[in-house]
Image (tube, rainbow, N blue to C red):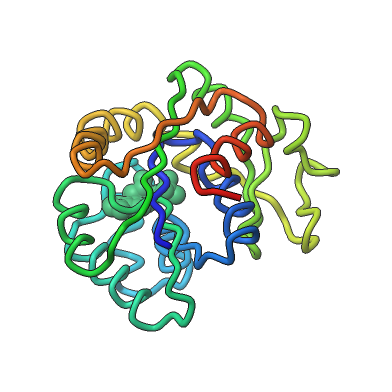
Amino acid sequence: MNIILLAPPAAGKGTQAELLKDKYNLNHISTGELFRNIVNSDSDLGKQIKDIMESGYLVSDDIVIEVVKNYLDTSDNKNYLLDGFPRNTYQAEKLDEILNIDYVILFNIDKSILADRISGRRLCKSCGAIYNVNIDPLKPKNDSICDKCGSELYQRKDDIDSFENRYNVYLEETKPIIEYYKNKNILYEINADRSVEEIFTSIEDILGR
Ligand code: AMP
């Protein structure tokens, strides 16, 4: 079973991905997280993509597709949960050449709610766990420390500086793939302006329990 989570920035797909991968034993691939790790590794590729990521533009398709292909080729669990990929129609077409997609889950949510959520988002520097200091059930016990591994929490630079741009990139580049998957009859829409549990239940209803 291969699933795509499709959503504007900070709609909660990372949080749902964590729950889904455990329940359905899926291989969670977040291209954003892969790229953040590449940037942190200080490699040439990392230096090349750092500024693009921080400003909220898309990394070039060639780089994205190579990183994704490499991940798919080298991982054992072949049931994928794709989070942050594809981000445009070209990537969607390329993905069709390498993987059969069963479900595309679209998170519907208003921009004003996203702006509020993004200001509270915190990530763990070492394990990547996601928290939100503005949302009670997603609050860490201490605002700057990860509950899971005790490492420091941080705010993504692109969350602080680039929300507007990322949202516009979503509208212009990513939204068109909704039609692409609608035409294939594999698009499922959920209301993402609800609690983590309610959203998860809706996704379980789509996937079957
Ligand atoms: P995310 O963690 O999904 O919000 O991604 C963070 C950033 O990584 C994005 O703003 C892009 O710069 C880059 N990125 C992640 N996935 C992709 C993709 N599929 N195509 C191009 N750029 C991407």
Q: Total number of numbered labels? A: 0
Tell me the quadrant of the picture where the N terminus can be found.
bottom left
Q: Residue at x 56, y 23 (%)?
A: 193
Which of these two is toward me, 185 or 72? Answer: 185
Which of these two is toward me, 110 or 100? Answer: 100
Within the image, what quadrant is residue 175 found in?
top left
Query: Eyeballing the image, is 9 above or below 112?
Result: below
Question: Can residue 120 be seen here?
Answer: yes
Q: Is residue 145 left or right of residue 184?
A: right
Query: Eyeballing the image, is 193 above or below 180?
Result: above
Q: Position of residue 143 (x, y in %)?
A: 78, 41
Question: Can residue 53 be seen here?
Answer: no
Q: Is residue 187 left or right of residue 199?
A: left
Q: Residue at x 49, y 41 (%)?
A: 206
Within the image, what quadrant is residue 80 found in?
bottom left
Q: Residue at x 33, y 81 (%)?
A: 73
Specify the farthest residue to the front: 208
Q: Position of residue 35 (x, y in %)?
A: 40, 62
Within the image, what quadrant is residue 131 found in?
top right
Specify the farthest residue to the right: 141
Q: Position of residue 146 (x, y in %)?
A: 76, 54
Which of these two is toward me, 203 or 35? Answer: 203
Q: Position of residue 9 (x, y in %)?
A: 43, 36
